[in-house]
Amino acid sequence: MEQQPTDPLDGVTGMWLAEVKGGDSESFGRLYEHIAPALLTWAEFRIRPEQRQHIDPADVVQEVWFRAWRQMDSFDPATTPFRFWIFRIAKNVLLEAARKTQRADTAGAGTTAKVQQLGELQDTMTAVSMRLSRDEGLAAFRAEVDALPDEDRRLVVHCGLEGLPLKEVAQRIGTSTEAAGKRWQRLRARLAEGALPEHLLAGA
């Protein structure tokens, strides 16, 4: 199995995962603060203009987080990087939204205490989402990426935000792993010249 790209987020999340698995909603809120900018940026890129009246990026991010909270017991950081795991959930959420399926409710989500803690996180998630919607740095980053050639935009989405292995990304854009890696390193260095939010992009 190909090794996942190095992600600076992994070192941060490692401090909190044990507490989260023990049901600590405060630590889970910290994880949300760190990954929400990348999730929201990803959703902004992936939701097509004609879908915007039906699918709100902030709603997608919050639904991803609801599901992550309910599925956290099944997450194994020893085998799967956190970013890869959370974006796998995000892809499923967006696919379901695109198919106009009804949002899953909290039935069968776990213990009553855990569902109650999830409700307590709502205020935190809403506050973070509102702050990110006004973040000028994120808006400038999205505008810069929107102006890139198609292959470079896909590198940002797949390598930078989703944290996919370079081999898989290279296959998607039709180039070699080495070429994709070099291109992503140059692109990431150029993007990093701006004031990017911490942990927005995975490593090369």
Image (cartoon, grey):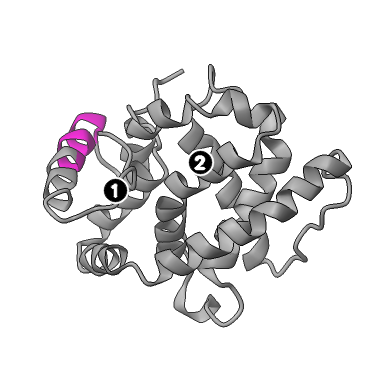
Figure check: 156 above or below 15: below
Q: Nearer the viewer, residue 78 or 94?
A: 78
Q: Secondary structure at mark 2?
A: helix
User: In terms of depth relative to the viewer, which is nearer, 4 or 200?
Assistant: 200
Q: Position of residue 40 (x, y in %)?
A: 45, 59
Badge count: 2
Question: How far is mark 1 from mark 2, CA to CA?
Answer: 24 Å
Location of residue 159 in the rendering, given as x and y in whole percent from the top left corner: 33, 42
x%, y% of residue 94?
59, 59
The residue shown at (39%, 59%) is: 41
**Amino acid beneath label 2:** Leu
Badge 2 crowding class, 10 Å Cα cut-off, few under 14, some 14 to 19, many 20 or more, is many
* Residue at the spot of label 1: 155
Pointer 1 or 2: first along the chain? 2
Q: Secondary structure at mark 1?
A: helix
For the record, the magenta segment spans: 176-184
Q: Amino acid at mark 1?
A: Leu
Q: Which residue is mark 2?
A: 31
